[in-house]
Image (cartoon, helix red, strand yellow):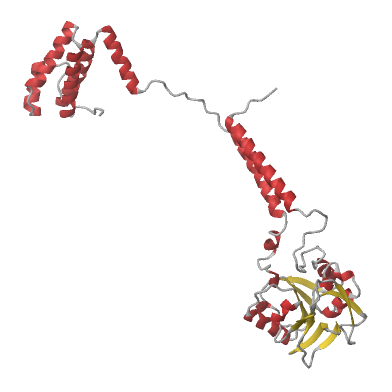
Amino acid sequence: MRIPLEAGDRTLLMVAGVLLVATTLAAVLFTPASGEPLSVGYPSSYSAASDGGKAAYLLLGELGYKVERWTNPPGQLPDAAKGVVLIIADPFPGITFDEKRQVEHFIRRGGRALLTRPGSFSLLPASDSTSTGKPGFGWEEFPARALGPISRFAPFISMKTTVRWGRRFPDDVAYYGDEQGAVVVKSKLGDGEIIWWADSSPLTNHGLTRAANLTLFLNSIGPPQATRVLWDEYFHGLRAGFWDYLGRTPVPWALAQIGLLFLVIVLTYSRRSGPVAAHQPETRLSPLEFVETVGDLYERKGAAAGAVEVASTRFRFLLERRFGLASPSSLETLSGALRERGGQPNSELIGILRKCEQAAKRGRVSGPQALALVQSLHDYTRRLRLGRIGG
């Protein structure tokens, strides 16, 4: 059985269908074709993509490190910096002078900072880099060039970079590199240390599995005992907490579809289950059409005298009510009331009323005469302000 739909219901269903198709197409277009998570382009601790840093972040927690994401400004770094490691992997450009000074102050108080890529140079007090000029960023193996805690049990590391450490300071130790320069350097700054990597690829989800990159990462952090690790997300732009990160996931799309479905349900339910009001058809007769119809009836029956009698009776009633006279009153009584109380000349008005009486008694009067008498009564009603007459 086919259920008839009203025009409003059909429009609502069509709009809901179009919106549903649009959201479905958007979800298909913006979803990666493979099972690989969407890359964000930097080693975020939230990203499970090959270039993300989620595996390294979770591994630190499993190995007993006190690890947490850091989304606060660098001015809120712990005052007791000894035993605290700050990981700043591929910071975004636009680091201010105050932020640089606050990070440097944290290191001088005894903190350790693991910085990657040339973008981190803006956080160092003085440094420089050189380029090898090689095209592309393929994986390369770099041997250990110095013995120490950073290169312990890690004779080779694998990294994707065309950058080398350019400036040398007396306290710099180049742990890994080649004939073109160093790619892993440790420097002293006050009571703290800076460990610089030419690229963040060794700590990414994919890079941890290559060569001795995992060992390099753990050696750069230090032993888990009494070590607190702060994985920086502040310089990745995540400065509004968890909800800002949530906005980069498919969750808003899911919420939008749920909201659309809820809106359709509410609109459909309200149209079907709301209060039922009886349809009130508009009348076909307006007041002016009613007057014209009555006038046609008087004209067809030749009863113009009746119309004059109705208008005269109404006028005399209003006049008697104005002067407090008994109804019905004679023409002489009305004439005296007009002269004594109204202060109006009454000869013309009394003459009109007398003609109306005569027309009603005879029962016949011509159309033009009846129209003239009714118009005169209407005019006197307005002049004497006997009643509210329409324009």
Q: Nearer the viewer, residue 341 or 203?
A: 203
> Can residue 154 be seen at all in this image of the molecule?
no
User: Where 213 sits versus 5, above or below?
Assistant: below
* Residue 232 quadrant: bottom right
Q: Position of residue 12 (x, y in %)?
A: 61, 36
Q: Which image quarter is the C terminus in?
A: top left
Compared across the picture, whether 331 is left or right of 40 comes to left
* Residue 77 quadrant: bottom right
Q: Residue furthest bottom?
A: 170
> Can residue 307 be seen at all in this image of the molecule?
yes
Compared across the picture, whether 364 is left or right of 121 comes to left
User: Where 154 sits versus 283, above or below?
Assistant: below
Q: Residue at x 74, y 73 (%)?
A: 90
Q: Residue at x 71, y 54 (%)?
A: 251
Q: Residue at x 15, y 12 (%)?
A: 357
Could you tell me how many numbered marks the image carries?
0
Q: Position of residue 352 (x, y in %)?
A: 12, 17
Q: Which image quarter is the N terminus in?
A: top right
User: Where 25 sits versus 173, above or below?
Assistant: above
Q: Position of residue 65 (x, y in %)?
A: 83, 74
Compared across the picture, whether 281 is left or right of 287 comes to right
Q: Nearer the viewer, residue 192 or 321?
A: 192
User: Where 148 sits versus 224, above or below?
Assistant: below
* Residue 118 quadrant: bottom right
Q: Residue at x 26, y 28 (%)?
A: 390
Q: Position of residue 100 (x, y in %)?
A: 67, 81
